[in-house]
């Protein structure tokens, strides 16, 4: 990274969780993401960049440069098939067969900071502190409530629904906790506490907009009414903007979708209200992420480091088509019983909602399918 003997550049990798291909502005999305737009305006957009179709395998590849099967994430827990148990490459955590980017950069003189989702191991030997991160504030699991209650996605997920800081488990989250805000706060703190002028590697892995779709109350109504027109009314303008931006061929037609989910005109009035509200919360969650990322970029500016920092932004996989009963052993009944999924409570503590298949297809415009599949909408 050294430029003619100059100081090596800082590196900041920012990951969104389950964000669709065209959700953000630089890729044609209607969701206000001015900070990402700013980065894109002065940077490059990668149109042939692919990920895995799931969280942890992508992260394993991102942090090692190796195929996920080589480093222990051949399958993501708890999705092991019987013949995958105890098999090399299927450990379900980042094994020690390859160094991480953080280990290599730290050995090369970088400070290494992480804030956000880890999902690559929960034991002391597999947490960020053991894999090269000098400072870390990490969520170790796959997902949870974004508020202080940190409610697990399911009973099976509960054992990895843990936060840690610098290798030690965090007992209790502050009452004001919201995931994206805390992760930005922590990265800013680590940047401020750095006492020398060595370069840094930052890994900011937001858990937004992974379900449960949630935002701080003051953000809840930011997109009110914006999705009342339904799926096609959102998809068409996205496609048009992508053409204007030169991201796709000008004669590309709208993707007809996989046909597994109901069309807008097949929904009852009540179902439409529910669907539109879910997308409103999802959109607000992405704009909120952009704002929190903006605070980190502002900090770099104020430390006069922004121009010496290479910033990468990616989503770890495509948009999520699954409903909350996808996470075993949840059922529709258990979700209804254990969460307050009344329309007024969507996006607030105690709710557990997801955008579902039809919106996931819109979020991945113009690609086919979504997270959990290896079609382009998944990767
Ligand atoms: Ca993900």
Image: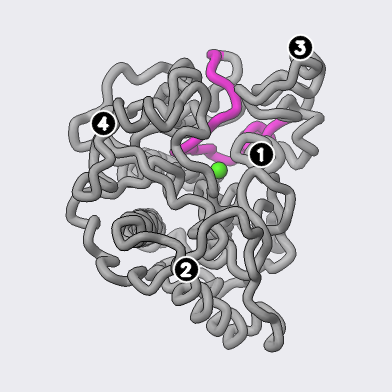
In the rendered structure, are the residues bearing label 2 and label 4 in contact, judged by CB atoms less than 8 Å apart? no
Residue 369 at x, y percent in the picture: 65, 56
Residue 376 at x, y percent in the picture: 71, 58
* Of labels 1 and 3, the one closer to you: 3
At mark 1, the secondary structure is helix
> Residue 245 or 262: which is nearer the viewer?
262
Q: Residue 115's image quarter?
A: top left
Q: Name the residue under label 2.
A: 231
In the image, residue 108 sits, relative to residue 92, either above or below, namely below
Which residue is painted at 75% across and 29% down in the image? 74
Which residue is painted at 65% across and 43% down in the image? 372
Q: Which part of the image, by quadrant, shows the N terminus? A: bottom right
Q: In this view, does 122 lie to the left or right of 279?
A: right
In the image, residue 45 sits, relative to residue 267, either above or below, namely below
- Dot 2 or dot 4: first in sequence order is 4
Q: How crowded is mark 3: few (under 14 residues within 10 Å), some or many (20 or more)?
A: few
- Dot 4 or dot 1: first in sequence order is 1
Q: Residue 187's image quarter?
A: top left
Q: Residues within 10 Å of mark 1 (few under 14, many from 20)?
A: some
* Of labels 2 and 1, the one closer to you: 2
Q: In this view, does 46 lie to the left or right of 234?
A: right
Which residue is painted at 72% across and 37% down in the image? 64
Q: Name the residue under label 1.
A: 63
Q: Mark 3 points at which residue?
A: 86
- Dot 1 or dot 3: first in sequence order is 1
Q: Mark 4 points at which residue?
A: 148
Q: How far apart are marks 3 and 4 (CA)?
A: 35 Å
> Residue 44 or 110: which is nearer the viewer?
44
Q: What stretch is highlighted in magenta?
A: 99-124
């Amino acid at each position: 990274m050294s430029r003619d003997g100059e100081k090596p550049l800082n590196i900041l990798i920012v990951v969104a969780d389950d964000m669709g291909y065209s959700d953000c502005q630089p890729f044609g999305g209607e969701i206000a993401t001015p900070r990402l737009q700013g980065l894109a305006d002065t940077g490059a957009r990668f149109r042939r960049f692919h990920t895995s179709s799931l969280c942890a395998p992508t992260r394993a590849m991102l942090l090692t440069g190796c195929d996920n099967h080589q480093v222990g994430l051949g399958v993501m827990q708890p999705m092991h098939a019987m013949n995958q148990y105890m098999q090399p490459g299927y450990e379900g955590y980042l094994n020690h067969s390859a160094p991480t980017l953080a280990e290599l950069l730290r050995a090369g003189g970088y400070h290494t900071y992480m804030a956000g989702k880890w999902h690559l191991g929960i034991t002391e030997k597999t947490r960020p502190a053991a894999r090269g991160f000098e400072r870390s504030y990490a969520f170790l699991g796959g997902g949870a409530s974004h508020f202080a209650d940190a409610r697990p996605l399911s009973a099976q997920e509960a054992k990895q629904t843990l936060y840690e800081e610098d290798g030690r488990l965090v007992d209790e989250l502050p009452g004001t906790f919201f995931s994206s805000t805390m992760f930005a706060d922590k990265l800013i703190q680590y940047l401020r506490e750095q006492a020398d002028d060595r370069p840094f590697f930052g890994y900011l892995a937001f858990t937004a907009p992974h379900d449960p779709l949630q935002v701080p109350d003051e953000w809840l109504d930011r997109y009110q009414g914006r999705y009342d027109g339904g799926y096609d009314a959102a998809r068409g303008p996205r496609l048009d903007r992508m053409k204007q931006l030169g991201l796709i061929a000008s004669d590309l037609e709208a993707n007809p979708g996989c046909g597994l989910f109901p069309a807008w005109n097949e929904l009852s009035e009540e179902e439409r209200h529910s669907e539109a509200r879910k997308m409103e919360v999802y959109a607000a969650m992405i704009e909120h992420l952009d704002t929190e990322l903006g605070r980190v970029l502002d900090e770099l500016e104020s430390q006069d480091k922004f121009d010496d920092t290479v910033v990468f932004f990616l989503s770890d996989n495509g948009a999520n088509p699954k409903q909350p009963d996808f996470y075993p052993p949840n059922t529709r009944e258990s979700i209804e019983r254990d969460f307050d999924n009344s329309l007024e409570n969507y996006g607030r503590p105690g709710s557990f909602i997801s955008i579902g298949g039809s919106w996931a297809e819109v979020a991945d415009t113009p690609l086919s399918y979504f997270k959990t599949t290896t079609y382009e909408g998944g990767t």
